[in-house]
Image (tube, rainbow, N blue to C red):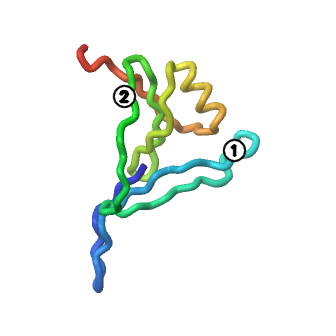
Amino acid sequence: MKKEPPRHYPTWTAPASFTLHEGNFASEGMILVTIMRGHSADSALVFEVAEEPTPGQVRVFLDFGGNTEPLHLAESITAAELWIAKEGYRNARLEIVADEEG
């Protein structure tokens, strides 16, 4: 996911926007095409949190171009590493979900 602030041009202003990663097409472990879709921040899209991560789960992120993209939520470090190997994200970063109360 990528966020962009409003952009001002001489004749118009582009509203703030965000880009969602919708998927990849891969072959033999190599990502060939990445599908990204941009949306205006003032669009009619509605989002809701389906499930909160639980302590001990592992978030998989990809940092690029000053942005951080959440890629996957795994049940364990081992599951996260297997997912990374399968999907081909060699530069992914892992973050263990902490207990909010601890």
Name the amino acid type tagged 2: Glu
* Residue projecting furthest to the right: 28
C-alpha span from label 1 to label 2: 30 Å
Q: Position of residue 7 (x, y in %)?
A: 30, 70
In the rendered image, which residue does mark 1 sit on? 30
> Tag 1, which secondary structure?
strand
In the rendered image, which residue does mark 2 sit on? 52
How packed mark 2 is, by other alpha carbons closer than 10 Å (few <14, some 14-19, many 20 or more), is few
Where, quadrant-wise, is the C terminus in this rendering?
top left
Vertical placement of residue 86 versus 47, above or below: above
Question: Residue 88 sits in which quadrant?
Answer: top right
- Label placed on residue 7: none
Q: Position of residue 51 (x, y in %)?
A: 39, 30
Q: 91 and 60: which one is in front?
A: 60
Name the amino acid type tagged 1: Met
Q: Identify the residue at image location x=56%, y=19%.
A: 78
Q: Identify the residue at image location x=36%, y=37%.
A: 49
> Tag 2, which secondary structure?
loop
